[in-house]
Amino acid sequence: MMESVFPVLYILAAAGFILAIKWMNSPATARRGVLVGEIGMLLAVVGTLLRAEVVSYQWILIAFFIGSAIGVPIAYYMPMTAVPQRTAFSHACGALAAALIGTAEYYRAKPHGVVMTALIVETLLGFLTFTASMMAFGKLAERLPQRPITYRGQNFVNLGVFVIAVACGVALIISPEQTWLYPIFSVLALIFGVLLIVPIGGADMPTVIALLNSYAGLSACAMGFVLNNRLLITAGALDGSSGFILAVIMCKAMNRSFSNVLFGAFGTIQLTTGKAEARPVRSASAEEAAEILDAARKVVIVPGYGMAVAQAQHKLRELHDILSKRGIEVSFAIHPVAGRMPGHMNVLLAEADVPYDRLVEMDEINPEFPRTDVVLVVGANDVVNPAARLDKNSPIAGMPILNASEAQTVMVIKRSMNPGFAGIDNELYYLDKTLMLFGDAKAFLTGINKELTTA
Ligand code: NAP
């Protein structure tokens, strides 16, 4: 009886995963997507526990309590800004689980042929994704040095370690009885994961995490072949492909290739900011900024990484409400890689209850800028840098940007003339139409809102 129930649960779970990905595509349906994904996972777990292969529930219960003791506090206490490192950590856990299951299966069953090949793919990807994700976690949480560490012949060393690990894997596929080789294979895969991340700068970690997500998914997919579990194959393939597609989208939005992200050591570029500070810019006070906003008919707000740092989204929502009540049209221009993770701005603005229909994607908002009276840039830099279009030698050349410079007036809230992620100066700040509003985004917006409400 039980054996006939679990395939039904599996099909429902797979449908839940697919719908979850579909609904998570839009902020309006994202919550529903998360819920249906959670229900899918619950059905998958229940379905698996009902299978005849489960001989004892004792160890499963112990693992359940240990996992919950780690997972529940993470879900409750990790702040929104720590989501990238939290994601890296959960990928590390998933990948380690896949690698350990593969290892147990190797010593238990010593499979041959196709199953052994799947097991080697599973454990290779699982082990390397585990250490790579832990390194990514360390860099994102700023517990490891952020800057890329490079040395001569690095790619050669990394490739060498990988090739030897693969060679050990192939030898194990040919002759699974050589158990002495398995620990060497595993350690090499673990080392390769560390080496892979060393030359990548902290700020590129979100793209790398998307890629590691893909590897963890493929590892789980291979595990499905090893354990003859169709749901694992489906879920792993979904995870593997969605992670890969996300990484491609992020690379495109930054106009960078995979090889540039993985081997380009982005973030080492040091441009002289001193020179930038020597050039004159026009600045304004909160009072002046409030007056300009009050006189506008159409305002576009461009949020960026600085908004996330300052946690200024609630103040932006207040500003949106104040201006909207006065009949001023306010929209938020969302660049696909604003901030440090995909959907960063959408998530923060949704947290502050900014209406979804006020968020406009880059391609839709760009034609609106010439008709816009005021663009208010809040802690964004690279995503509005005209150098992407005008300077072929710029590190961000070709990156699609929000054409903020086409508006009548541009106001930029940031603390200094320091550059953003790409480490380059921004010509937008020196235009006659631009006013720099120096200060922390939250504090400055508080000032503007106060001026507007007391005026
Ligand atoms: P950005 O270019 O990194 O610039 C952020 C700006 O915010 C800085 O210039 C900084 O200037 C300012 N800032 C920092 N803290 C602030 C605070 N408390 N108050 C006010 N301003 C503050 O950010 P972006 O325009 O959002 O561009 C994102 C960059 O990250 C792109 O280059 C993108 O390629 C890259 N990236 C994005 C992702 C993703 O998935 N979203 C992934 C990887 C890389 P001050 O220090 O002067 O205040």
Image: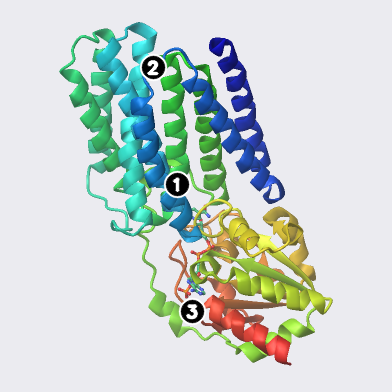
Q: Is mark 3 within 8 Å of ligand 1?
A: yes
Secondary element under disc 2, as helix, strand or loop, is helix
Secondary element under disc 3, as helix, strand or loop, is loop
Of the two numbered discs 2 and 1 on the same chain, state the one appearing first in sequence: 1
Structural crowding at the residue carrying mark 2, measured as other residues with C-alpha within 10 Å and reported as few (<14), some (14–19) or many (≥20):
many
Q: Is mark 1 within 8 Å of ligand 1?
A: no
Q: Is residue 200 above or below residue 285?
A: above
- Residue with the mark numbered 3: 415
Report the Cα–Cα distance between label 1 and label 3: 29 Å
Of the two numbered discs 1 and 3 on the same chain, state the one appearing first in sequence: 1
Q: Nearer the viewer, residue 402 or 38?
A: 38
Q: Is residue 73 above or below residue 235?
A: below
Report the Cα–Cα distance between label 2 and label 1: 26 Å
- Residue with the mark numbered 2: 118
Residue 33, picture quadrant: top right
Q: Quadrant of the N terminus?
A: top right
- Residue 443's mark? none
Structural crowding at the residue carrying mark 1, measured as other residues with C-alpha within 10 Å and reported as few (<14), some (14–19) or many (≥20):
some
- Residue with the mark numbered 1: 87
